[in-house]
Image: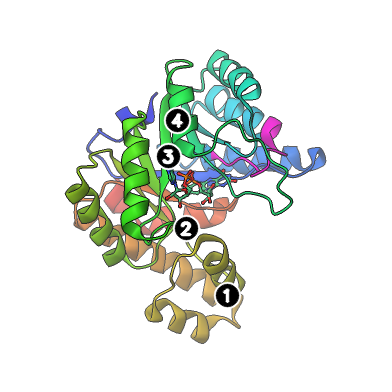
Amino acid sequence: MKIKEILQNGKLNLSLEVFPPKEWPKFDDTIRTVDSMALLSPSFISVTYGAAGGTKTYTKKIAEHIQQQCHVTALAHMTCVGTDREEAQKLLSELSNSGVENILALRGDKPLSGEYKKDFTHASDLVRFIKTSGDFCVGGACYPEGHPEAESLSKDMDALKIKEECGVDFFTTQMFFDNNIFYCFLNKLYQKGINTPVIAGIMPITKPSQVRSVMELSGSGVPPRFRAIVEKFGDNPKAMQQAGIIYAAEQIIDLYANGVRNVHVYTMNKPFVAATLRSHLSEILA
Ligand code: FAD
C-alpha cells in the first residue's frame, strides 16, 4: 500500500524504523529484529540507507522481506550521496518488482573525504527522478528546528517548498523532543503554503549516550525537562529506559490529542522498546 493512503485512514498511525547491518553475518539478526517489529502491526516499517550507500543491498533485501514475508508496508530509504542515476534506476526497478512502492528520498550526509555520488545534488532532485521512474509514493525529510546546514529556517522552508513542487507525497520530521517546536513548524509550513502531510518523528531515548549523539548528528535540541530525566536516571539503565519510553509515549499522546495522527518512531532496531511503547498506548491505538 502507498504510505500517502495510510496517512489518510483517520487512525493513529505508528511506523517503525530499522537500519541494515554493516556486515553480512549480522543480516539474519536484523531479519529477526524486523520480524519482531512486524508482529507489532506498525503502519509501515522504514529501512535506512548507509549515507555513502555501503549497505544499499541490505536495505533492498530487508525492504523486500518486510513487504513480501511480513506483509507490512515497507519504506526503503535512498540517498543522493550513495546512488548515481544508473544505480537508482536499477534499484527502483528491483524494488518495484518486489512490490515495494514507497521510497524516502534523502540527500544523505556528505562524507568528509568528498568521495560520494554527485548525479543528484539535493533530495528534491532524487524526488523528481523517482517520480518520473515509476508509480512510487515518495517521502522526504524535514527539520522542525531547521536543517543544520541551512542559513535559516526560512531558507530551509524554501527548500521544502521545492521538494513539494518536485512531487514529494509526505514528509517525515527529524526527531524532536519538544512538541511545541513541532506545532510551530506546522504553522510555518501552513504559512508557506506547504500542504504535504507530515509524519512526526519521535525517538525514545533509552541511554544517556544517545542524548549526545542525537544533538551532534541531528541538531535536535533536548529540552531541560528531558535533561533532568537523564541526570536523575542516567546511572540506572533500567530506570532510564523506562523513563525514556514513557517520555516518548507522553509526546505521542500529546500529539494525538492535538490532532496529529501520523507518528514515526525511531526504534533503532529495538523491538522491546517499540513493544513497550505500544503497550503504553494500547487503549489509544485500540
Ligand atoms: P536536502 O533536502 O537536500 O537538504 C539538505 C540541505 O540543502 C538543507 O540545508 C536544505 O535547506 C538545502 N537544500 C535542499 N534543497 C535545496 C535546493 N533546491 N536549493 C538550495 N538548498 C537546498 N541519512 C542517511 O544517510 N540515510 C538515511 O536512511 C537517512 N534517513 C533519514 C530519515 C529522516 C526522516 C531524516 C529526517 C533524515 C535522514 N537521514 C538519513 C539524514 C539526512 O540524509 C541528512 O539530514 C542530510 O544532511 C540532509 O538530507 P535531506 O534529504 O534533508 O537533504
Q: Residue at the location (30% across, 28% down)? A: 5
Q: CA distance from mark 4 to mark 1?
A: 36 Å
Q: Is residue 37 above or below residue 218?
A: above
Q: Secondary structure at mark 4?
A: helix
Question: Residue flagged by tag 1: what amino acid is it?
Answer: Pro
Mark 2 closeness class: few <14, some 14–19, many ≥20 residues within 10 Å: some
Q: Is residue 115 above or below residue 185?
A: above
Residue 208, numbered circle:
1
Dot 3 beta carbon under 8 Å from ligand 1:
yes
Q: Residue at the location (69% across, 40% down)? A: 116
> Badges 4 and 3: C-beta atoms under 8 Å apart?
yes
Q: Earlier in the sequence, mark 4 or mark 2?
A: 4
Question: Residue flagged by tag 2: what amino acid is it?
Answer: Thr
Q: Which residue is mark 4?
A: 127
Q: Which residue is mark 3?
A: 140
Dot 1 beta carbon under 8 Å from ligand 1:
no
Q: Which residue is mark 2?
A: 276
Q: Earlier in the sequence, mark 4 or mark 3?
A: 4
Q: Position of residue 132 (x, y in %)?
A: 44, 17
Image quadrant in which the N terminus is located: top left
- Is 253 placed left or right of 90 in the picture? left
Q: Earlier in the sequence, mark 4 or mark 1?
A: 4
Q: CA distance from mark 4 to mark 3?
A: 8 Å
Q: Position of residue 63 (x, y in %)?
A: 58, 30
Q: Which residues are magenta?
A: 47-58
Q: CA distance from mark 2 to mark 3?
A: 28 Å
